[in-house]
Image: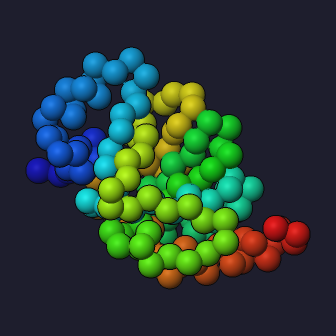
Amino acid sequence: METTALDWLAQAAPDPQAFRAQWERSGLGLVLLPAGRHWDVLSVPGRLGRPVVELLGTGSCGPVLADFGEEHIGFLVPVGTAARWIGTGVRSAGEGTWIVVPHPERRGRGVRWLVPPDGSGRLNDPVLLELALHEAAAGLGDW
């Protein structure tokens, strides 16, 4: 049986079944999930993150979140990346932190998926992400 995006995200919750039930009851379709269990998150300003998503393209880009107004773009990366990442203007969420996650199968306003998870467990490659961040920053000039 193929894992859905919802199943994959639920696996990060302390109690996946209770989590799924809560998510289905939530009118907003937003829930808190712990980072650092199955993935970390690297968040960059939207004006940098949007070009990075384009540079990575659909073949190389793992799940990507956008907050209200796309002021920040969050890239899901392998566990441990947040603890090792050094970069100006990059916020990280790893073990001991929680993030707001939208339902992968619903469109809403506010926090949303720019690139939704596909259920495979594919994440953004930190090396490719770093290269794309450098290229995008160079294209922005006075970043």
Q: Is residue 118 above or below residue 91?
A: above
Which residue is at 36% across, 34% downward?
A: 31
Residue in view at x 49 percent, y 30 percent = 107
Residue 28: x, y in percent?
A: 43, 22
Q: Is residue 103 placed above or below 93 in the rendered structure?
A: above
Image: 88 above or below 37: below
Does residue 53 appear anywhere in the picture?
no
| Left or right: 131 as drawn, with respect to 65 | right
Residue 27 in picture, x, y percent from top left? 39, 17
Q: Where is residue 23 shown, x and y percent of the image?
A: 29, 28
Q: Nearer the viewer, residue 1 or 81?
A: 81
The answer to whether any part of residue 36 appears in the image is yes
Residue at position x 53%, y 55% in the image: 74
Please tell me which residue lies in front, 30 or 84: 84
Q: How is the model colour-coded?
A: rainbow
What is the quadrant of the C terminus in the image?
A: bottom right
The number of callouts visible is 0
Q: Nearer the viewer, residue 117 or 71?
A: 71
Residue at the (58%, 41%) spot, across then down: 67
- Is 46 on the left or on the right of 82, as rendered? right
x, y percentage for residue 125?
44, 74
Q: Residue furthest front?
A: 96
| Residue 68: quarter of image | top right
Compared across the picture, whether 81 is left or right of 108 comes to left
